[in-house]
Image (cartoon, rainbow, N blue to C red):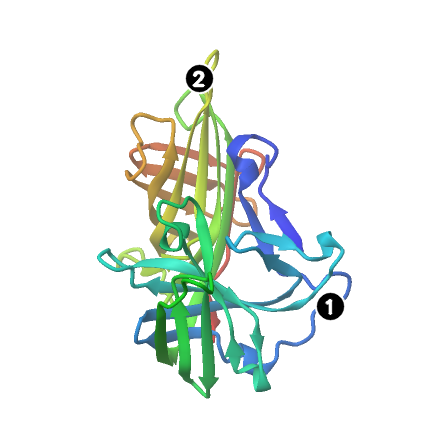
């Protein structure tokens, strides 16, 4: 498993932020099977939208909480095709939220996937902490899903909550990966040094139009799209906050591609940015030696601009069609 870490990965919370990249190991990955590729795209199901946005050949495995690891690192190297996706889970009595889905396509023509979806462990054990990777089963017949199910439990003695799932593929999605890092003093300030790091993927239902005047194309972030920020306060403990990105727009600023994204604070030592507060981040890719920029808005209002990648580094992929 190849792990691409952000700059300054050894410092504070930024060390926790990594982008897992599927890797076949020493040799080149085989060509993706057509049946496995057929899962990629947007699916409409009787239990909400389901999107598969990535197919990779990898040695990644995961435990019952969904935490990933390298099977080669455990001396049990097993490479397989891995579908990554997200599902708008219909949590009872609450607003829908997108959750991570991942699994290996198998069966005749790769027409079966037994993914797991990541939800709160408290569904299985009342007041349980952390996450669990709950079972799902999907059967594909052409562009239709027939005979599948999902469960909110995995212990055999209590797993009677069985939901029949059907659906149909409705079209492709467009995805753009991004990563950014910053270290130094914000623009216009002199005292407090900061570190900021983020990475993730944003998905669009249609080919995005980067028209600033028209507001750009709106997309949704995958559940793993996160940002970490640290204030290095002289003579005092550092302040840190993290937030999960939810949605954003793809724009062009002065011929430079940009993402304007909004999220929710998940953890914080900053009294001005408590968990649940709204926060935004705008990243602009300088490209070819131009100045890149990272800008926070909402409960934090700071920005960093530099052509020096050791101070500000932004990488924004062009949106690519998937499925």
Could you say which quadrant of the image residue 239 lies in?
top left
Q: Is residue 14 placed above or below 4 in the rendered structure?
A: above
Give the label on residue 148, or none. none
Q: What element carries label 1?
A: loop
Residue 260 can be seen, yes or no:
no
Q: Is residue 137 above or below residue 157?
A: below
Given residues 162 and 269, the one toward you in this image is 162
| Residue drawn where x is 44% and y is 42% of the image | 227
In the displayed image of the protein, which residue is found farthest to the top? 235
Under circle 2, the secondary element is: loop
Residue 228 or residue 319, whichever sits in front: 228
Disc number lying in front (2 or 1): 1
Which is more N-terminal, label 1 or label 2? Answer: 1
Which x, y percent locates residue 179?
51, 48
Q: 87 or 305, which is in the foreground? A: 87
Which residue in the rendered view is the most extreme toward the front? Answer: 157
What is the number of the mark on residue 28? Answer: 1
Mark 2 residue crowding within 10 angstroms, few (<14) / some (14–19) / many (20+): few
The answer to whether any part of residue 28 appears in the image is yes
Tell me where residue 308 sits by quadrant: top right
In this rendering, position of residue 32 left or right of residue 214: right
Front-most of 195 and 133?
A: 133
In this figure, which residue is indicated by the disc labeled 2?
A: 191
Residue 277 location, quadrant: top left
Provide residue 18's location: percent of width, then percent of height.
56, 46
Distance of mark 2 from mark 1, alpha carbons? 48 Å
**Residue depicted at x 34% and y 63%:** 88
Q: Position of residue 231 (x, y in %)?
A: 44, 25
Tell me whether circle 2 and circle 1 mark residues in contact (CB < 8 Å): no
Most extreme residue toward the left is 93
**Image quadrant for the N terminus?**
bottom right
Q: Work out whether 230 lies above or below 190.
A: below
């Amino acid at each position: 498993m190849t792990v691409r870490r952000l700059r300054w990965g050894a410092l504070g919370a930024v060390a926790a932020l990594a982008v897992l990249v599927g890797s076949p190991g020493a040799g080149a990955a085989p060509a993706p099977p057509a049946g496995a590729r057929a899962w990629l795209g947007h699916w409409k199901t009787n239990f909400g939208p389901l999107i598969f946005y990535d197919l990779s050949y990898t040695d990644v495995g995961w435990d019952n909480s969904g935490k990933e690891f390298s099977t080669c690192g455990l001396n049990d190297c097993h490479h397989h095709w891995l579908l990554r996706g997200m599902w708008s889970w219909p949590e009872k009595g609450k607003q829908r939220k997108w959750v991570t889905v991942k699994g290996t396509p198998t069966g005749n023509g790769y027409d079966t996937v037994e993914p797991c979806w990541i939800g709160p462990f408290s569904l299985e054990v009342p007041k349980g902490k952390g996450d669990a990777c709950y079972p799902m089963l999907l059967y594909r017949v052409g562009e239709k899903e027939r005979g599948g199910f999902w469960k909110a439990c995995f212990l055999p003695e209590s797993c009677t909550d069985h939901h029949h799932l059907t659906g149909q593929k409705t079209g492709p999605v467009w995805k753009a990966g991004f990563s950014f890092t910053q270290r130094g003093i914000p623009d216009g300030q002199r005292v407090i040094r900061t570190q900021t790091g983020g990475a993730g993927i944003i998905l669009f239902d249609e080919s995005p139009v980067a028209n600033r005047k028209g507001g750009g194309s709106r997309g949704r972030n995958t559940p793993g799209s996160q940002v970490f920020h640290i204030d290095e306060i002289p003579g005092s403990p550092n302040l840190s906050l993290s937030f999960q990105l939810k949605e954003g727009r793809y724009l062009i600023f002065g011929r430079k591609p940009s993402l304007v994204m909004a999220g929710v604070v998940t953890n914080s030592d900053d009294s001005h940015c408590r968990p649940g507060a709204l926060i935004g981040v705008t990243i602009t890719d300088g490209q070819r030696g131009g100045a890149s920029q990272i800008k926070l808005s909402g409960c934090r209002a700071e920005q960093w601009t530099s052509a020096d990648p050791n101070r500000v580094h932004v990488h924004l992929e062009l949106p690519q069609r998937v499925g």
